Amino acid sequence: MRKTALLLVFALVFSAFALVGCGSDEPTDTGSTAVGDLPAGVQEIADSGELRVGVKADVPNFGLQDAASGEFEGMEIDLAYALAERMGLSMDDVVFEAVTAKTRGPLLDNGQLDVVIATFTIKPERLEQWNFSDPYYQDEVGLLVKTASGIESLADLDGKTIGVAQGATSRDAVQVEADALGITVEFLEFATYPEINAALESGRVDAFSVDKSILSGYLTEDSVILPDGFSPQDYGAATKLGTDDLTTFINEMLAEMEANGEMTALLEKWSLN
Ligand code: GLU
């Protein structure tokens, strides 16, 4: 009798272990994250223990670095945190690096960054150089001028000089509009936005042109962003060419955030809708 009871206990314990064993072979439904089932290219980053992200440091609501604390904040910063979480990494594992329109591509190419989430416009020619995710935001190119200049639209910039950033889409976008209006504009190219802004302040350029989101960071009491807006810009997260695992992984995250309302909440949080 005691032997039978003992056998029964043994059988029960054994089947319990067998069940647990079977369970671990099944994919675990963790709700919103894909942790535990990462594609090879993403697993490599997760294994490195850090996600290196190129972001803007001077674009309010997208990527802004606090001068005192050195902390980054903005919609693109939150996207980086969401991506890290999806990889099973924590917020502390995200290493931000401030990039410009000129530096972000080379930093991906030389392997210093895993991903760039930095107001990076998706363009056909750029798709030949880098992988881009699906768009997560759309902006347009605008013009910032000094209010005292009396300039009210691009047409008023006939014969004048416009400051643009090297490596940005702005110059081509403005040129197309200027041609359509039949006006002539000169361009001066700068490496950074603070330099263009300084040129606007000193009168070296008559207007500062780039995406409106970026211009908003330079708006002062005596300047104005003109109502003109042209050349819609779709922003995507860029990774090194051929890192398709990672691009798909980012696209899945964006689609999920879109479907579950997280994207709307994120845009609301940063006053971008
Ligand atoms: N979004 C534009 C571009 O990708 C403007 C430049 C910038 O993002 O700094 O060219």
Image (cartoon, rainbow, N blue to C red):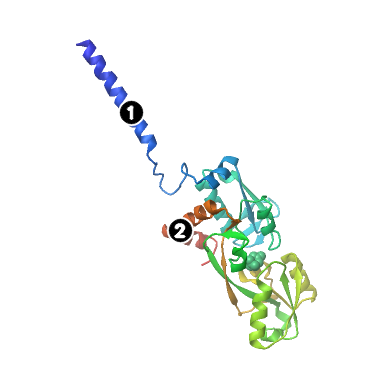
Q: Residue 63 appears at what percent x and percent y?
A: 62, 59
Please name which of the two marks, 1 or 2, marks the residue nearer to the observer.
1
Q: Position of residue 235 (x, y in %)?
A: 57, 64
Residue found farthest to the bottom: 182
| Residue depicted at 45% across the width and 60% down the height | 258
Kindly identify the amino acid type of the residue bearing the numbered disc 2. Answer: Ala
For numbered disc 1, what is the local secondary structure?
Answer: helix
Q: Is residue 166 visible?
A: yes
**Front residue (pair 223, 205):** 205
Percent position of residue 68, x then y: 70, 52
Q: Nearer the viewer, residue 39 or 2?
A: 39
- The residue at the point 31 percent across, 23 percent down is 14
Label 2: few (<14), some (14–19) or many (≥20) C-alpha neighbours in 10 Å:
few
- Residue at 63% over, 61% down: 129
Q: Is mark 1 within 8 Å of ligand 1?
A: no
Q: Identify residue for label 2.
A: 255
Residue 18's label in the rendered image is: 1
**Is 130 placed above or below 230 here?**
above
Q: Element at badge 2?
A: helix
Is residue 123 visible in this depiction of the protein? no
